[in-house]
Amino acid sequence: MEMRQLHYFVALADEASVSRAAVKLSVAQPAISRQLRLLEEELGVPLFHRTGRGMKLTSAGRVFDGRVRKILTDIGELEHDVRALKGVVEGKVTLGVPPTESHILLPRLLDTLRREHPGVDLRIVEAFSGDVSELLTTGHIDVALFYKAPRTKHYVADELLHESLYLLQQGGTPPPQDAPLQITDLVDYPMVLPSRRHGLRALLDQVCSEMGGSLTVEHEVDSLMTIVRMVETGNVATILPFNAVQREIAEGRIIATQIDPMHLRRTLVLATTTHHPVRAPMRIVAQLCADIVHDMAASGEWQGILSKRQAG
């Protein structure tokens, strides 16, 4: 069994066609067909059904597919880790981050990687916290920042920061008289919020329910930019962390009133997947994220209270 046979097999499984696999691999079709035949002869079972619509994995092929992909991933990780022993860290990392944090974290993170670790190829997935958590749980991303969710065996998480939440209104609106606000003060404001599948909305609904009330949700919008623009029109308010709208607040387009953190706050966590071993590039990205959050919170650039572990 040869490495090229495994790569050819995976390409065939992905493309379901010898011709498409040949294009993908830049290899002649007869070479792929021959190596597949040799592989099936060695294993003693067919790996594909050949049909008029292409190639479909057999039951044996599906088992083989799962194991082969893991083997190829492990070999790739081994190569990166061995190279790292020379002091040169190379490899791909997928980072998930919510839009409320991306604009404050990513510029500094990307600049540091470019200067100090040019061999680390970072792919960024920006999504609401609940989606980031799900992508990490399913192994589609390697490292993630999101807001605290139930513990799971699929990732390892450490608390970074506790963030207050704020009532956001159009700039120039008279601010509420009493601050910090209580949960009961929020029920009469017409709101634009993310849909119920998102972590922030779930937290708000839970806390309001525990206090015996509910928010007046006029619109559900799963886009941070759209939510902020709707607040700027003055027809609705929303609830977000201060960091999400720092620029708009500084420019007077939005005013922010803190909600009592004794009743409502979020905990930002940093997590790494357990779907595969933590490689050197993943460790670098995770550590840089933690360092940036710590430094920005300590300097006041990132509004929040560091967790005891981070503060120590």
Image (spheres, rainbow, N blue to C red):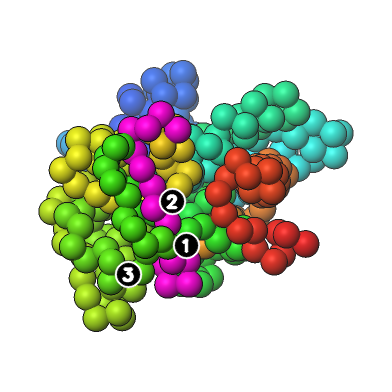
| Residue 208 locus on image (x, y percent) | 28, 73
> Magenta residues, as a range?
250-266
| Residue 289 locus on image (x, y percent) | 63, 45
Residue toward you, 26 or 157: 157
Q: Secondary structure at mark 2?
A: loop
What count of labels does the image hold?
3
- Look at label 2 and name its amino acid: Pro
Q: Nearer the viewer, mark 3 or mark 2?
A: 3
Residue 40 magenta: no
Residue 266's disc number: 1
Residue 232 quadrant: top left
Label 1 Cα crowd, 10 Å radius (few <14 / some 14-19 / many 20+) = some
- Look at label 1 and name its amino acid: Arg
Would you name the residue on which mark 2 appears? 241
Q: Nearer the viewer, mark 1 or mark 3?
A: 3
The residue under the point 72% across, 30% down is 117
Name the image quarter holding the C terminus.
bottom right
Q: Is residue 230 left or right of residue 121?
A: left
Q: Secondary structure at mark 3?
A: helix
Q: Is residue 48 left or right of residue 274?
A: left
Would you name the residue on which mark 3 appears? 183
Residue 264 magenta: yes
Q: CA distance from mark 1 to mark 3?
A: 15 Å
| Residue 222 locus on image (x, y percent) | 25, 46
Q: Given contact means CB atoms under 8 Å apart, are the residues at marks 2 and 1 in contact?
A: yes
